[in-house]
Image: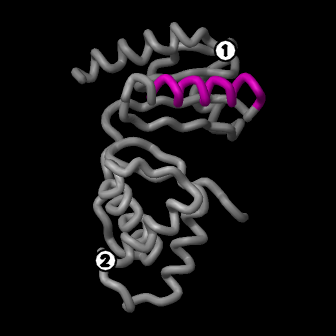
Amino acid sequence: MKNKITQIRVEGYLTGVIGLEEIIKAIAEHPGQMSDSEIAASLLIRIQKLNYVPSKREEAYRKALLREYKKYMGDEVETESPGDLQVVVLGPGCYQCTSLETDVRNIMAEMDLAGDLRHVTDPKEIASYGVMGVPALIINNKVVSAGVLPDKKMICQWLADARKTLGE
């Protein structure tokens, strides 16, 4: 699948990277020929051809990309913590569900909130949450909305409340 988006953690933030899988596979074809710093630099250069990487975050990206490369190679790696904020969007991938995910992602970015954002589309997994309507929004294991597309101001408020309870 060309230009597939892979989610990785960069300084605690879940970040979508276009083409990472293909780039890692290409570099992995020649194992042992480069040092870790050379691998990280090569990954970053190739990733920047398809993705915007802010110059002040290049070092963080190098670390994250090298970690993903090592995982691919089967090496033990230390995982990067997502922070304590856990956000789940439930919905089969319809317009409203996708809109909710986009709204939450944008609001988290505007608020500079680090956390884990997942969109669950599998009907069995959605049912396991016991929610009666989709789209649904769950923040830190608490259902805050179900069956409607909530207003962006409400999403902001729920995330601000979650931030307070985490002590950020």
Task: Name the residue located 38 percent from the left edge and 91 percent from the top edge.
Answer: 33
Q: Residues within 10 Å of mark 2 (few under 14, many from 20)?
A: some
- Residue, far left: 167
Q: Judge whether 45 appears above or below 73 on screen.
A: above
The kind of secondary structure the magenta stretch mainly shows is helix
| Left or right: 2 as drawn, with respect to 164 | right
Queried whether the magenta region covers residue 82, the answer comes back as no
Please report contact status of discs 2 and 1: CB closer than 8 Å, yes or no: no
Identify the residue under disc 1.
Answer: 149
Near-viewer residue (94 or 1): 1
Task: Name the residue located 37 percent from the left edge and 71 percent from the top edge.
Answer: 41
Near-viewer residue (56 or 68): 56
Q: Secondary structure at mark 2?
A: helix
Q: Which mark is residue 36?
A: 2
Q: Quadrant of residue 89?
A: top right
Near-viewer residue (132 or 19): 19
Q: As shown in the figure, which amino acid type bears the numbered disc 1?
A: Leu
Residue 14 pos. (x, y %): 45, 44
Near-viewer residue (69 or 121): 69
Q: Quadrant of residue 23?
A: bottom right
- Residue, far right: 94
Queried whether the magenta region covers residue 105, the answer comes back as yes
Which numbered disc, 2 or 1, marks the residue that appears first in the sequence? 2
Task: State which region is magenta.
Answer: 94-108
